[in-house]
């Protein structure tokens, strides 16, 4: 299957290098040199977005939020900054992964393959109608979550983390287990922070009191769990 990747960066040489390398792997590339140019292509079928964070007029985070209004395709951020606050902003805006410049082609290739594989595998899994968990109703066919009458707007990864935990109720899952179960790749050093950022955002949206969580609980030193 030939996947289509949109690459958005205001540095033409970076777009060109990624385009040449990815086309060499058999991907179809939509090159864009600004967020505004990318917005003009959002009606097209795109399987993965690679977005630079620091762009004039509209940055990568703002563009990602626009993308999420129309598409659930994976978003990989490229940035020269790798502080936790930057990652929180990226994941909160709907991003799926984060690659800090300068990066190797091998690492970029690995991240792209992992994101596309996860998206493809998830789409092929048969979905049940509804999952009820406390006051949450998870509709897998529509990929929606309601808390009472209110729809909870989750990012793609927040949704998948919640479903993974609920499907493994009463099991304490380590951060590495959650990463491997949701990202569908082997855990590596540093994934703990990635999972914790998503978990913090998830709790902020689904818990009545995120500082005293009742839906997704923590067993300190062990991991996270959902219980009946």
Image (cartoon, helix red, strand yellow):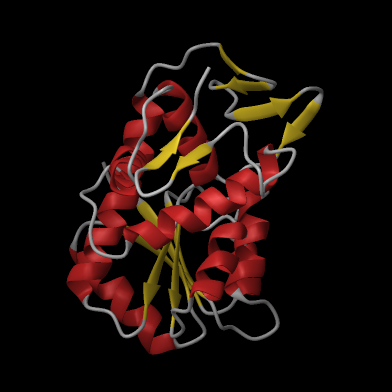
In this view, 50 is above or below 123: below
Residue sitting at x 47%, y 55%: 196
Q: Name the residue at the front extreme.
A: 220
- Evaluate whether residue 101 shows in this view: yes
In this picture, residue 116 sits left or right of residue 203: left
> Taking 135 as reference, is 25 above or below it?
below
Q: Nearer the viewer, residue 71 or 77?
A: 77
Disc count in the image?
Answer: 0
- Residue 204: image x %, image y %? 67, 48
Res 70 seen here: no
Q: Nearer the viewer, residue 21 or 173?
A: 173
Q: Quadrant of the N terminus?
A: top left
Vertical order, 205 against 193 (above or below): above
Q: Quadrant of residue 165?
A: top left
Taking the spot 67% from the left edge, 58% from the top edge, the residue there is 66
Residue 150 on image: x %, y %: 80, 30
Q: Is residue 105 above or below residue 137?
A: below
Q: Image quarter for residue 145?
A: top right
Does residue 127 appear to the left or right of 93 in the view shown?
left
Q: Residue at x 63, y 29 (%)?
A: 144
Looking at the image, the residue that sits furthest to the top is 129
Quadrant in the picture for residue 61: bottom right
At 29% from the left and 80% from the top, the residue drawn is: 17
**Residue 121: percent from the left, percent from the top?**
32, 33
- How far from the left and from the top, in percent, is residue 164? 42, 31
Q: In front here: 2 or 203?
A: 203
């Amino acid at each position: 299957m030939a996947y289509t990747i949109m690459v958005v960066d205001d540095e033409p040489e970076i777009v060109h290098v990624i385009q040449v390398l990815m086309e060499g792997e058999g991907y179809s590339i939509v090159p864009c040199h600004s967020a505004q140019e990318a917005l003009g292509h959002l009606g097209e079928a795109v399987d993965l977005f690679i977005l630079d964070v620091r762009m004039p007029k509209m940055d990568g985070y703002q563009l990602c939020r626009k993308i999420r209004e129309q598409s659930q395709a994976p978003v990989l951020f490229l940035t020269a900054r790798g502080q936790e606050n930057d990652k929180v902003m990226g994941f909160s805006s709907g991003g799926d992964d984060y690659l800090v410049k300068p990066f190797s082609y091998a690492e970029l290739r690995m991240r792209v393959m992992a994101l596309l594989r996860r998206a493809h595998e998830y789409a092929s899994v048969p979905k049940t109608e509804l999952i009820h968990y406390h006051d949450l109703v998870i509709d897998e066919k529509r990929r929606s979550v309601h808390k009472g009458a209110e729809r909870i707007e989750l990012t793609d990864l927040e949704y998948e983390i919640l479903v993974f935990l609920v499907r493994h109720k009463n099991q304490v899952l380590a951060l590495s287990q959650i990463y491997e179960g949701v990202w569908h790749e082997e855990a590596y050093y540093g994934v703990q922070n990635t999972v914790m950022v998503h978990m913090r955002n998830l709790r902020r949206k689904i818990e009545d009191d995120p500082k005293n969580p009742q839906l997704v609980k923590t067993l300190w030193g062990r991991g996270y769990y959902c219980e009946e």
